[in-house]
Amino acid sequence: MSKPGRMITSYQSRMEWLPLDDLQIDRKTQATYNEARARAIAERFDPDLFGKPLAWAERGADGVERFYVLDGQHRVAAAIVALGKGQKIECEVVRGIDRVRASQLHLGRNMSRRPTAMDQFLVGLTAQDPECLCIAKVCGAQGFKIGPLVTDGTIGAVTAMKKIYRLQPPGARGQLLAEVLRILSSAWGNKSHAFRGELMLGMALVIKTYGASIEEKPLVHALKISEGPLNLLGDAKKLKSSLKQTIASAVSFKIVDIYNNRRRSGKVPSWIEARSRKGKANDGEAA
């Protein structure tokens, strides 16, 4: 009978009592702060149910050790309200890791708590996740930022971009997303409503299904003189039920329809016909 093994971590960890005043929040390694959630915890504050927040101890260039909360920012905020800043709480403190590993610990500790897609993406950037880094690089090359506050020039549809990224094999990932952003921005500029998730994914499915059969310049022109992205999306939502497909697929239907309506020759098969020929497997729209 073999002896039970021990799980060995790559970092040091121990329980310590830390002043609430000393606990800092590093936004690059934390999900978005929700004040209402912290207030709700404070209102029913119970030390026995509090748990132990996870803190990362980092020694700065000045030699001073600083403590950053990796897991439990809302509990820490609630404790400040309930106990006051002068109090101490018991924390699990880790040492011997860098910021990248700290971000990875945050993601790992929060896998079952369903942080928002944007939270996961932004923390993934700090953790140097290859998928997140590639998507951010593609967006940056096209002149876009990624963030939760969606304004012109900023894209918030990270779930859709991840789906588009995964539509291609590993060696080519990022190319399809770049093409989607280029076409949509050429047609409608950097307006935020042109880069909603369903619109981007619908365009990606068109490109993936038709390839070079659809010419980019005529497609951009057709979209540019159409009634705009919001109307396209509205029509797609109306079509969703009758087509018995996803909104993204209904967007693809509309894009192909707009393209063909502006062509005297060189029309492509309808979306329904093209899909029946190619098949719907592995298109990512339901991922």
Image: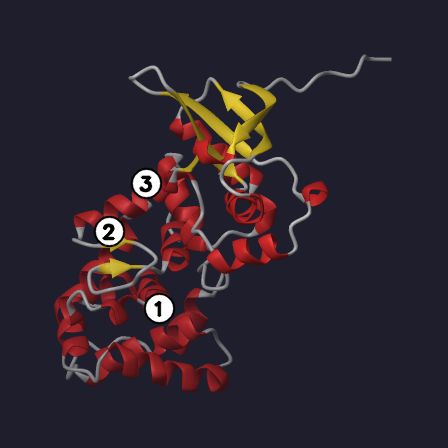
Q: Looking at this rendering, what residue extends furthest in the right direction?
A: 1
Gap between marks 2 and 3, in whole Å?
10 Å
Callout 1 secondary element: helix
In which quadrant is the N terminus drawn? top right
Amino acid type for the residue under numbered disc 2: Cys
Gap between marks 1 and 3, in whole Å?
23 Å
Q: In terms of sequence position, does the residue under pointer 2 or pointer 1 come before the other?
A: 2
Residue for badge 1: 202
Residue for badge 3: 133
Residue 165 - label: none
Residue 139 - label: 2
List x then y, in percent, for residue 91.
Answer: 58, 30
Could you classify mark 3 by the number of other residues whose Cα lies within 10 Å: few (under 14), some (14-19), or many (20 or more)? Answer: some
Q: In terms of sequence position, does the residue under pointer 1 or pointer 3 come before the other?
A: 3
- Closer mark to the observer between disc 1 and disc 3: 3
- The quarter of the displayed image where residue 58 is located: top left
| 229 displayed left or right of 19 | left
* Front in this rendered view, residue 246 or 156: 156
Amino acid type for the residue under numbered disc 3: Leu
| 113 displayed left or right of 219 | right
On the question of residue 170 being in view, the answer is: no
Gap between marks 2 and 1, in whole Å?
18 Å
List x then y, in percent, for residue 73.
Answer: 50, 43
